[in-house]
Image (spheres, rainbow, N blue to C red):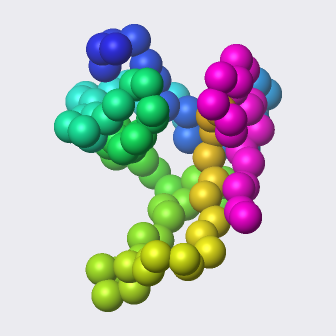
Amino acid sequence: MHEADLTVLEGVTNYTKQDSETASIHSLDKIVIHPNYDRTTLDFDVGFLFLKNRISFIPTAKPIALAPVSERPKHGDILLATGWGRTEVGEVNCASKIIALSP
């Protein structure tokens, strides 16, 4: 996968229905994939996308607050994850609408 192959869509919750008044498309400068990512098990399935230009935050595109290191989750904590993608191993289609997963 190369940076030129991907773009980032900002300001929407359903990427199949782009609203030209709220959506912005950004080109990528760099992709950093976790060095221990395993394509078979999907362990360490995390990475960073660095954009060529800054995002201008608007009501439909706001920064996500990350928890401080002092509040790292502990084993057994219940967490909430949101995003797009496959929710099960072997699933063929990715979700087009943003989803939330919790136990």
Q: How many marks?
A: 0
Q: Is residue 53 visible?
A: no
Q: Could you say where residue 2 lies in the image, as x and y percent from the top left?
A: 30, 14
Q: Is residue 33 visible?
A: yes
Q: Is residue 56 left or right of residue 9?
A: left
What residue is rendered at 72% in x and 44% in y? 98
Q: Could you say where residue 71 lies in the image, as x and y percent from the top left?
A: 39, 85
Q: Main secondary structure of the magenta part?
A: loop
In the picture, the quarter occupied by the N terminus is: top left
Q: Is residue 14 above or below residue 40?
A: below
Q: Is residue 74 above or below residue 66?
A: below
What residue is rendered at 45% in x and 32% in y? 41
Q: Is residue 81 above or below residue 11?
A: below
In the picture, the quarter occupied by the C terminus is: bottom right
What residue is rendered at 63% in x and 30% in y? 89
Residue 96 drawn in magenta:
yes
Residue 38 drawn in magenta:
no
Q: What's the magenta region?
A: 87-103
Image quadrant assignment for residue 82: bottom right
